[in-house]
Amino acid sequence: MPTLPSDFVDGVRDAAPLHLGIVPFGLVAGVAAVEQGLSIFHAIGFSTVVFAGASQLAMIELLGSDAPLAIVVGTAVVVNLRMLMYSASIAPYFRDFAARSKTIASYLLTDQAFALSLARYNRETGTDRFAYYIGVAVSLWAVWQVATVAGAVLGTGLPPEWGLGFAAPLVFLALLVPALKDRASAASGVVGGIVAVAVVAAGIPYHLDIIVAAVAGVAAGLAVESFGGDA
Amino acid sequence: MATSYDPVTVWGVIVVAGVLTFGIRASFIYLFGHIDTVPPRVKSALEYVPAAVFAALVFPAVVAPAGDVALSLGNERLVAGVLAALAAWYTERVFVTIAVGMGALWFLRFVV
C-alpha cells in the first residue's frame, strides 16, 4: 500500500484545529439554505460548486428575499473579492505547478488554506508545496461538505419560531470582529454597517445594501489610511 | 422567508457564482509571470473589503431586522447581537458567538 506523503499528513494535522472551527459555519450554511426554501441539493451545490461560506450565506439570504439575480451574484463576487489577495500572495509558490494542479489549488483556495500554507512555506522551504496545501485544503473541503449536509438535514426538522435564520448574521459577526484589526479597517466596518442600514431603512430597492456599503466602507478605510496616520 | 425562484434558476445562480468565484481564486495563480503584483492602491482597497462587507451583512439584520431601524431593548435581535458581539470580541470563536447569540434570542423569546 502506498504511503501518503508526509507533507500531506502535516497539512491535515495543521488544519485539524480549524476543522472544528468551520463545523458550526457549515451547519449554518446548510440550515440557512433550507430555511430560505432551497433544497438540500441546492445546499450541496452551493458548498461544492461555490465553496466559499460567507458568499454562500449571503446568496442564500438574498435568494430568500427574492433579490434580483444580478444582485445575488454581484454580492457574492464582492464578498469573495478578498480572495484576489490570497491568489496574488500565494501565486509565486504555485508557479511551477502543472496546469491541472493549479486548477485544483485554485478551486480549493480558502482563507484558512491560504494562511496555513503561506506560513508553512515561509517556515520550511523544503516543503512539498502541493502535498501540504492539498492536505490542508482537501480536509477543510471534506469537513465543509459534511457540515453543510448535516445542517440541511437538521434544518428541515426545526420549527421556524426558533429563529435559526439569525445564525447567519451571527456567523458574519464572528467573521467581522477579527477583520477590525486597525483604525482604518474599523472605519470601513462602521461606515459599511451604517450605510447598509441606511440603504435598507431608506427602502432602496433591489437589495443593493451590501454592494453600496462595501464601496462606502472601502472608501472610508482608504480615507482613514491616507489622512488618519498609520495607527 | 422562502424564495420564489424556481429550482433551476437557483442552480443557474450556483453555477454562475461558482465560475466567477473560481475566476477570482485562479486569477493570479494563472497569471503569475504576466502580472506578478497587485497595485498598492488596489491592495489597500481589498484589505478593507472584509470589514465593510461583513459589517454590511451584520448591521441590518441586527439593527433593522424588520426593515425599520429599531434601537430599543424591545428588539430582541439587537440585544442578542450585542451580546454575541462581546462573545466574538473576547473569544474570536464562531461556535461561541453563535451559541451566545442564539441562546440570548431564545431566552428573550421563550423565557422573558
Image (cartoon, coloured by chain):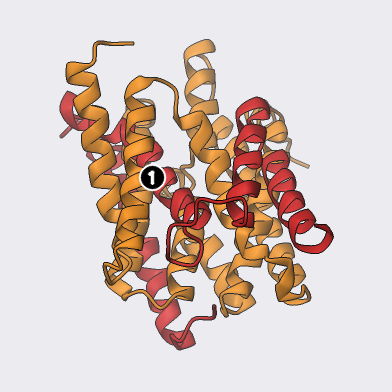
Q: Please tell me the colour of chain B.
A: red
For the residue pair A227 and A140, the one nearer the viewer reads as: A227
Q: Is residue A39 left or right of residue A227?
A: right
For the residue pair B81 and A90, the one nearer the viewer reads as: B81
What residue do we see at 49% from left, 42% from top? A110
> For the residue labelled by badge 1, is the local secondary structure a helix, a strand or a loop?
helix
Q: Is residue A68 left or right of residue A24?
A: left
For the residue pair A106 and A176, the one nearer the viewer reads as: A176
Q: Which chain is orange?
A: A
- Check the image and report above or below for A230 versus A9: above
Q: Is residue A68 left or right of residue A153?
A: left
Q: How many marks?
A: 1
Q: Position of residue B96 (x, y in %)?
A: 72, 39
The N terminus of chain A, quarter of image: top right
Name the chain under label 1: A
Give residue A206's quadrant in the image. Answer: bottom left
Amino acid type at image mark 1: Gly
Q: Is residue A51 left or right of residue A231?
A: right
Check the image and name the residue furthest to the right: B111
Q: Position of residue A211 (x, y in %)?
A: 28, 55
- Check the image and report above or below for A69 versus B71: below
- Check the image and report above or below for B72 versus B34: below
Q: Label 1: which residue?
A: A193
Residue A71 in view in this figure:
yes
